[in-house]
């Protein structure tokens, strides 16, 4: 058994034990997940990902380990956009909070299977047509520029979602309360519930984001082990991150711009290889960390500044109102 096979085996064993721990001891069916529990779960998955980083450093060397860390950070930051859409999906279908954990778990596990298929396809294409990396680079630059300029959509109507329209067309659906079930039988006919729709939409939404994130990971590394593991660890941590950030996702209003800059950087890095220019993994990791840190700091500063302006405006209005009251009293 070679080093790569040992790494895959280690990853598989750790992953199964972690999922069993999450399901058996941390998450239970029909229970709401508190902020405290979400914080514990998030810390658990991040710590596990970092432990695997340490294992890769020992087993595969610092270059592979740093590529993994860069890819993981890229995927983890992109997942915050997933959370924004997940909130819209749950609100649109009026999902009960006690069902969030179970539905998210199934949707995310399905998303992981779809990602594995996409990654496998990407690896096969790159092995046969290396020039496709330059196509990915061009796509990332275009996506990054579009993302930087785009504004977040608020109150998006999911009734226009293509997957939702297709499901409504081909499946018998029921909006009836089904007690957390994904299907029910009425008059001898099987109907699928809104929870089933939610699971499918969660998985397909993640794939839409993966169309950007997976090429970005290929821009960081073409080592199959790194591409698979960074994606899976980031997506598995998405469920706890949802519960931790769902009330604060708007606080990171400028993270989108930071991610956009990273995507453009990775795209340029991929295209630079045409001219024989190769950037070190330390430099790439540094750029990713700086972009994300600046974007988060900028978001928090902007929010606090907006809150100060709002308080100042409110104070000014109160003073103005008080003057008007006193003036009328004097009259």
Image (spheres, helix red, strand yellow):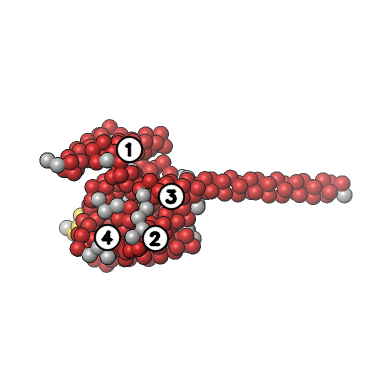
Q: Earlier in the sequence, mark 4 or mark 1?
A: 1
Image marks 4 and 2: residues in contact by CB distance under 8 Å: no
Q: Is residue 244 above or below residue 219?
A: above
Q: Quadrant of residue 277?
A: bottom left
Q: Is residue 182 visible?
A: no
Label 2 sits on a secondary structure element that is: helix
Q: Position of residue 36 (x, y in %)?
A: 41, 34
Label 1 sits on a secondary structure element that is: helix
Mark 3 nearby-residue class (10 Å; few <14, some 14–19, many ≥20): some
From the viewer's perspective, tell me whether residue 252 is left or right of residue 314. left
Q: Earlier in the sequence, mark 3 or mark 4?
A: 4
Mark 1 nearby-residue class (10 Å; few <14, some 14–19, many ≥20): some
From the viewer's perspective, tell me whether residue 266 is left or right of residue 247. left
**Residue at which label 3 appears:** 287
Quarter of the N terminus within the rendering: top left
Q: Position of residue 77 (x, y in %)?
A: 40, 49
Q: How many numbered circles does the render carry?
A: 4
Label 3 sits on a secondary structure element that is: helix
Q: Earlier in the sequence, mark 2 or mark 1?
A: 1
Q: Choose mark 1 or mark 3, whichever is in front.
A: 3
Q: Earlier in the sequence, mark 3 or mark 2?
A: 2
**Residue at which label 1 appears:** 50
Q: Residue at x 39, y 36 (%)?
A: 39
**Residue at which label 4 appears:** 173
Front-most of residues 121 and 17: 121
The mark found on residue 28 in the picture is: none
**Residue at which label 2 appears:** 268
Front-most of residues 148 and 326: 148
Q: Choose mark 3 or mark 4, whichever is in front.
A: 3
Q: CA distance from mark 3 to mark 2?
A: 13 Å
């Amino acid at each position: 058994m070679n080093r790569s096979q040992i790494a895959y085996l280690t990853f598989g064993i750790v992953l199964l034990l972690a999922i069993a721990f999450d399901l058996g001891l941390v998450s239970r069916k029909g229970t709401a997940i508190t902020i405290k529990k979400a914080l514990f779960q998030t810390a658990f998955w991040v710590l596990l990902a970092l432990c695997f980083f340490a294992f890769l450093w020992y087993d595969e060397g610092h270059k592979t380990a740093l590529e993994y860390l860069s890819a993981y950070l890229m995927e983890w930051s992109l997942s915050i956009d997933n959370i924004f859409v997940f909130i819209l999906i749950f609100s649109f279908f009026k999902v009960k909070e006690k069902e969030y954990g179970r539905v998210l778990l199934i949707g995310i596990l399905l998303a992981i299977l779809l990602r594995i298929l996409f990654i496998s396809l990407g690896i096969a294409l790159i092995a046969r047509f290396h020039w496709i990396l330059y196509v990915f680079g061009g796509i990332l630059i275009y996506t990054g520029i579009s993302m930087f300029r785009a504004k977040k959509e608020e109150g998006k109507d999911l009734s226009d979602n293509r997957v939702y329209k297709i499901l409504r067309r081909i499946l018998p659906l029921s909006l009836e309360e089904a007690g957390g079930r994904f299907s029910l039988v009425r008059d001898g006919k099987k109907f699928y519930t809104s929870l089933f729709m939610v699971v499918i939409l969660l998985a397909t939404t993640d794939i839409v984001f993966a169309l950007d994130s997976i090429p970005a990971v290929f821009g960081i590394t073409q080592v199959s082990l790194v591409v698979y593991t960074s994606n899976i660890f980031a997506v598995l941590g998405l469920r706890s991150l949802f519960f931790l950030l769902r009330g604060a996702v708007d606080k990171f209003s400028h993270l989108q711009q930071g991610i956009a800059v990273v995507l453009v950087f990775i795209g340029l890095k991929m295209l630079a290889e045409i001219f024989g220019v190769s950037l070190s993994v330390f430099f790439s990791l540094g750029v990713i960390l700086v972009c994300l840190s600046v974007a988060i700091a900028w978001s928090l500063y902007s929010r606090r500044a907006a809150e100060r302006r709002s308080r100042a405006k409110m104070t000014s209005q109160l003073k103005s109102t008080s003057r008007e009251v006193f003036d009328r009293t004097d009259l």
